[in-house]
Structures are given as C-alpha cells and as structure tokens.
Image (cartoon, helix red, strand yellow):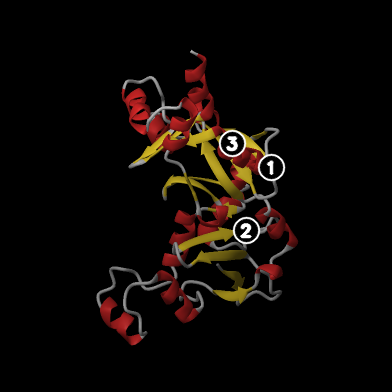
Amino acid sequence: MKIFAIRDESAVHQIDLAYLFYYELEKRFYIELPESADPWETPLLLSSFVKKGETSVNSYWSKLWVQQRIVPTDRQNLGQVLRDNNLKEYDEFGLLMLTMGRCAQDDYYLVPIEEAQLPVQIQKRFARLIEDVVPLENFELLVFFRDGTVKKCSIKEYFANTPSFQVLLRNEAFFHAVNLQPGGHGIEWDINLSVSAATLYRIGKKVPLSVSDFQSFVVHRVVNVAEAAEILNCSRQNIDYLTRTGKLHPIKSSGKNTLYLKSEILKRNWQ
C-alpha cells in the first residue's frame, strides 16, 4: 500500500486536504477525508462527500478523481505518450506519479507519506476497517471489524429506498456474492455497488461475537466429506448419495470439496 497526502500548492497555510491510498496488487485507489474537511477547500469531485458528511470515498469515485488528473484513455497520441514515459501499457498509477498528481485545472498535488504520519483521527478510522464479512439470510451481513467489534448490518433496511441497490435486493444469490474490498475499506458486489466500512460500522448493531469465536465455530462445527463419513461410519459414496437425495445439505460445494455442518451429520446418527 502506498499513501499520499493531497495538498494545495496555492494555499497560504499548508494542510492535508485528503489522503490517497493505492493498493498495487489490486490496482485500487481509495481516498480518506479529514473529519474537519472544508467543502470549499476540498477538491471539487470530493467535496460532495464532505457535504453529505462522509469521510471515506469508495474506489469508484477515488479512481475517477485520479483519472481526471492524468492522460485520458481516448487521447489521440496515447501510444506515443506511453512510450515517451517508458510505460508499456496504460497504467493510471504510473501516469499519476509522472506529475505527482498535478494537472492544469487546479493546484493540487501529491506528497508521499508513511502510515505513521497519518492524523490520529485517520489512524483511529483504520481500526474500524473490515477484517471479514459473512452474508446472512434476509439480506443481513455479519461484519468483523479490525478493532474486534462484530456487527450485524441490515442492507435491506438501510438501502430499501436506494435505487442502485434494488438489483441487489431482488437477487439473494447476488447478495451472497459479497466481497471484501482491498484493505478492508468496505464491501462490494461490483465496483459500482459498494458500502464503506464507516457506513457499516455506523448502521450495524453490535453482537456479542468475536473473530476468534467465528473461527472456532468453523474449525469445530464444519466438516468435509471424509470427516462426515467417519462420523457416520460409512463410505464417501454414501455421503454423496445422501447429498444427491437431499438427505444431507452441504453449506458449500466447490469441485471435489464439499462442507457440511457437523450438527446435521450428527443428527443422522440420532435417527
């Protein structure tokens, strides 16, 4: 991860207007705004987040801010520009670094910093990034945060009147395909359909569960085909037959790997 402070070269008193984070492997940008951000000083594209009281800018809008500061993909002589700058392909981060974020439309620029140089408020915010997320029934999520907090978040309740989320709320299979964003900045179903960690922390209801509790459950209460066969004292083929006939219900099946709740397997011995 690389971190940059966004500053205004024309400002009399130098302050950090925002912070840009770049995850190299995933090629993802995220922007975090200070709690005290002034919408009149904040870069125009980001000021709308300040006005809404949001301090975390998702990857879609963060990338859009970056794209506004570099050579566009439709530039006529793009190939020559890339060759002149020793770039083998169109690389947003590489192009951004050529000018350290400067462009002709404004006086903003980037300054590389270390994580320890981030304001205390931003560092505290990072303690509330997401470690893991588990989709539940009825469009709810179990979200594990970096500070050890676990919250249950109702996507259906919070986004019932948000047009962009209607496609998600009409398709439970799509909902269960939720992914964790790089760095734990939020969750997403695709790059245009995401929820920030800050929002989930705010809307979620705390539950008395920890990450270790959940890991312990998986270790002790989830079994594979071989373990299920051992518990029932039968062959793997018999487990496959019980699954095909609907007498066992796998919680996950991928290729040759199938997982079951141990409690369901044990119940077969009780019948």
Kind of residue at badge 1: Thr
Q: Position of residue 157 (x, y in %)?
A: 54, 28
Q: Which mark is residue 220?
A: 3
Secondary structure type for disc 3: helix
240 lies left or right of 50: left
* Disc with the residue nearer the chain's start (3 vs 1): 1
- Give the residue drawn at x 61%, y 60%: 40
Q: Callout 2 environment at 10 Å: few (<14), some (14 to 19), or many (20+)? A: many
C-alpha span from label 2 to label 1: 23 Å
Judge by depth and name the residue closer to the eye, 148 or 111: 148
Q: Which mark is residue 149?
A: 1
Kind of residue at badge 2: Leu
Q: Where is residue 84 in the image (x, y as percent from the top left)?
A: 33, 86
Task: Tell me the mark number nearer the camera, choosing from 3 and 2.
Answer: 3
Q: Residue 33 carries which label?
A: 2
109 lies left or right of 127: left
- Give the residue drawn at x 56%, y 52%: 184
Q: Callout 1 environment at 10 Å: few (<14), some (14 to 19), or many (20+)? A: some
Kind of residue at badge 3: His
